Image (cartoon, rainbow, N blue to C red):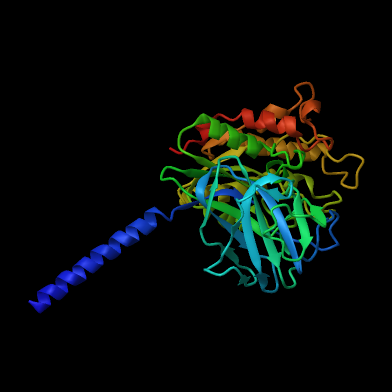
Amino acid sequence: MRKMMTTALAGAALAVSLVGLATAQENDDWIGTWTASAQPAWEADFAVPLGMQANLWNHTIRQVARVSIGGDKVRIIVSNEYGKLPLKIGAAQIGVTKDGAAIQPGTGKAVTFSGSPSITIPPGAPVISDPIDLKVEPLSEVSVSLFFPESAPTTTMHWDGHQTAFIAAGNKVADEDLKADSKQTQRAFLTGIMVEAPDDARAIVLFGDSITDGDGSTVDGNDRWPDTLAERLAQAGGPPVAVLNQGISGAKVLSDRMGVNALARFDRDVLNQPNADTVVLMMGINDIGWPGSGLALHDPEPTADDIIAGYRQLIARAHADGMRIIGATLTPFGDSFAGTPFEGYYTPEKEKIRLAVNEFIRSSNEFDGVIDFDKVVVDPTKPGYIKKEFDKGDHLHPNAAGYDAMANSIDLKLLTAE
């Protein structure tokens, strides 16, 4: 009898344990709602100035991010990927943005990591916060505040944030209306925000360079083409679709400088994103344009076949991971940076490489679909050149109107996972 009772109790305990585990799994499914790809801060030998605070020792930085899908709980991701020393977060908070550096009263929530309000991140590592009870609506803005009580060199950053970050001396994470001592548009350490995912939620990753990152869009305007795409997907209804912008200004398929090459960061930025099933690839114009310009005077020019070989690797890796990969054509760059220190970014010979790469994207049938941004923004009277009304002014980057046209040209059915 004692043996039977022991067996029954053990079975009951196991059943309770399994039910608890299942419940925990059902209630602990997370999905990214916003991302900013981590970059290493470069040295002064590079022609592009960093333009950001070099160390946040004894400072609070408040960073604003617009989420794509909403949820009742959130988590943040902070990265020390390119740090050479441990990075200590002394305190952190998240709240719903009111305006500028202010959060809506009563929405500020303390952030903990592994149950503690403070954590030290080893070099090369990220940390994910504990779940935070904060309801965020789709397409709303949240403000994440981080305080660093020790030396915190901003070696892990996202350079082209196109969003104002607010910096104040001391621990000001709990201030509803933070009074900034300085501002910058570069992000520091914050690389992701997650929400507790509905069962049918999914994510698409936009993997690109400055044209995905939003160079030419309005600072604090949320009018990059990924932003407008997120709005269209939200308005379309149906299951939530998160839009994760993993663009890096200056990014290249084959080599490093303003961030590591596409092949090196593909796992981190694309394949490792939970519930992501589709990636849109738009990258390669910097591989073509940089060599021989002030950005990379002595770099050898890749061939179209070199870039296509890189694409084929990304396609193979996406498919091996069960992801669909959509190719987006490279937009016109005629006379890009003419009359500037980056003269030589465009040449007629480089244009031939762009055309060959675009021909592969359009006609190879190796991608799971194609978005033809080239045809959206090209001047029909001057092939190879961007329309004047879509030109930021450097003849490479679209402006807000150009990004709007690009986002609205996308057939949303193309982004449906099948």
Q: Is residue 205 above or below residue 80?
A: above
Between 318 and 172, the one nearer to me in the picture: 172
Classify residue 261 as left or right of residue 391: left
The image quadrant of residue 148 is bottom right
Q: Residue at x 34, y 61 (%)?
A: 21
Front residue (pair 417, 125): 125
For the view shown, which residue lies furthest in the front direction? 106
Q: Position of residue 414 (x, y in %)?
A: 52, 33
Residue 58 visible? The answer is yes
The answer to whether residue 263 shows anywhere in this view is: no
Q: On the image, which quarter does residue 382 sit in?
A: top right
Outermost residue toward the top? 381
Quadrant that contains the C terminus: top left
Q: Is residue 201 above or below residue 61?
A: above
- From this view, report whether residue 62 is shown above or below residue 90: above
In this view, the residue in front, 362 or 271, is 271
Residue at 24% over, 68% down: 13
Query: Total of numbered circles in the picture?
Result: 0
x, y percent for residue 353? 72, 40
Which residue is at 29% across, 59% downward? 19
**Residue 313 screen position, x and y as percent:** 57, 51
